[in-house]
Image: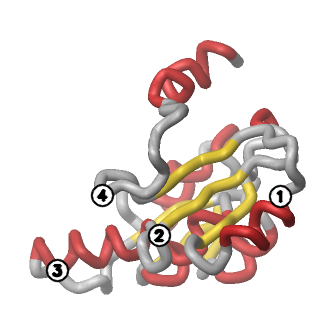
Amino acid sequence: MKKGFLPFYDMLIEGEELIREDINKISFLGSDLPFEVIKKELETRFTVIPSTVSFFGNNGGELSIPGIHKASGIEKLLQHLKIGKEDTFAYGDSLNDLEMIEFVQHGIAMGNAKEEVKQVADDITNSPEEDGIYNSFKKYGLI
């Protein structure tokens, strides 16, 4: 477990000013405050979603700038490359994947995805442990 999370842990920044030009997402882990209290306090300025990684505790989550998410990143990339989204695929399992799954042409939830992700997905594949992305690539003729 430690080896798997060590690269993530090494990237964490603590004790810095939260409002900066070079930050678009903040993760908070294992807070002493209940998630709902944090959400209520910050939801007028940030998009606030709960963490889906149980290792980080019940009161963990993410703060992001409204309108900045995986779908907006994909949209910018498509504009830059001057291509349409008719052949776009996205795979996700967490609440921070919702906009992306809805935006692309083929939004696919992993088998272990949160129920909210499965509800908006166009298809559901197996979990990562069951080769979900590989199986989906085969199904759609990508490999």
Q: Of tags 4 and 2, which is closer to the observer? A: 4
Which residue: 66% across, 67% down?
Answer: 48
SS at mark 2 in the image: loop
Q: Give the class, few, some or many, for how many residues have Cα within 10 Å of label 4's Cα (few <14, many ≥20).
A: few
For the residue pair 128 and 143, the one nearer the viewer reads as 128
Q: Earlier in the sequence, mark 1 or mark 2?
A: 1
Q: Of tags 3 and 4, which is closer to the observer? A: 4
Q: Earlier in the sequence, mark 4 or mark 1?
A: 4
Determine the CA span between mark 3 and mark 2.
21 Å
Looking at numbered disc 3 in the image, what kind of residue is underneath it?
Answer: Gln
Determine the CA span between mark 1 and mark 2.
18 Å
Q: What percent of the width, then of the height, locates residue 79? A: 17, 80
Which residue: 52% across, 64% down?
Answer: 64
Q: Can see residue 125?
A: no
Q: Give the class, few, some or many, for how many residues have Cα within 10 Å of label 2's Cα (few <14, many ≥20).
A: some
Q: Quadrant of the N terminus?
A: top right
Determine the CA span between mark 4 and mark 1.
25 Å
Pointer 4 with pointer 1, Cβ within 8 A: no
SS at mark 3 in the image: helix
Question: Which residue is identified by label 4?
Answer: 21
Q: Which mark is residue 25?
A: none
Q: Which mark is residue 79?
A: 3
Q: Give the class, few, some or many, for how many residues have Cα within 10 Å of label 1's Cα (few <14, many ≥20).
A: many
Pointer 1 with pointer 2, Cβ within 8 A: no
Q: Which mark is residue 35?
A: 1
- In terms of image quadrants, where is residue 5? top right
Is residue 104 placed above or below 73 in the rendered structure? below
Is residue 50 placed above or below 121 in the rendered structure? above
Determine the CA span between mark 3 and mark 4.
23 Å
Q: Can see residue 105?
A: yes
